[in-house]
Structure formats: C-alpha cells, structure tokens
Image: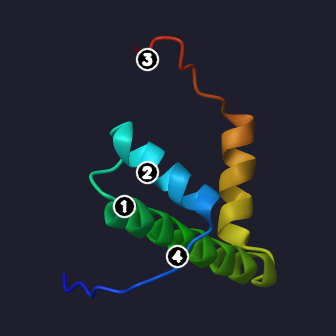
Amino acid sequence: MTTQQIGMRLQHENVEHLDAEVAAGHAKSRAAYVDRLLARDRRRKQSLEDLKKIANAGPDPDMDALLAYTSAHPVDMSDLD
C-alpha cells in the first residue's frame, strides 16, 4: 500500500483525544489512528449505499421462501457449545 504524508489542522480537543488514544495503546501512532477512523468511515458509507440498493431492489422470492422455511423449521441450537 502506498502512503502519502499530509499536513492537517485539528481542534485542540481532537488532538488531545488522538494523543490519549495513542498513549493508551489503542493505536501505534496518530497516523494509524486517523487511518483507522477514515477506513471505518469508508466502510460505513459503503454499507449505507449497499442498504439503499437492497431497499430499492424490491421483494426477493428466494429470500422470502428461505424465511418461510426457516420460520417453519426452527433449529435446536442448545447443544452448540
């Protein structure tokens, strides 16, 4: 993966939070923490787009049949340890 160094300005409170997260060991560095937050935000936005597509797709007969079958045939999961 290629990286690129950038400069950015953050509010003081955000820098304090960022430094606290690094100090607590939740990230190796400021950059690693910010990178993780950006990746999470990208995944969240992609998930929202996927949900919009699913919501607009209309009924799915195969999924409706699967739901009907699984509702009528419950699985005993008490022995799954």
Residue 71, position as x, y percentages in the image: 74, 39
- Left or right, 3 with respect to 75, comes to left
Mark 2 secondary-structure assignment: helix
* In this view, 76 is above or below 56: above
Residue 40, position as x, y percentages in the image: 50, 65
The residue positioned 79% from the left and 84% from the top of the image is 56
Sequence-wise first label, 2 or 3:
2
In 3D space, how far apart are the residues under numbered discs 1 and 2 (Cα atoms)?
A: 7 Å
Mark 1 secondary-structure assignment: helix
Which is in the foreground here, disc 1 or disc 4? 1
The residue positioned 46% from the left and 44% from the top of the image is 20
The residue positioned 54% from the left and 50% from the top of the image is 17
Which amino acid does the dot numbered 1 rest on?
Answer: Arg
Which amino acid does the dot numbered 4 rest on?
Answer: Arg
Dot 3: few (<14), some (14–19), or many (≥20) neighbours within 10 Å? few
- Left or right, 21 with respect to 73, comes to left
Mark 3 secondary-structure assignment: loop
- Nearest the viewer among 58 and 68 is 58
Judging by the rendered image, the residue that carries numbered circle 2 is: 19
In the rendered image, which quarter contains the N terminus? Answer: bottom left
Judging by the rendered image, the residue that carries numbered circle 3 is: 80
Mark 4 secondary-structure assignment: helix
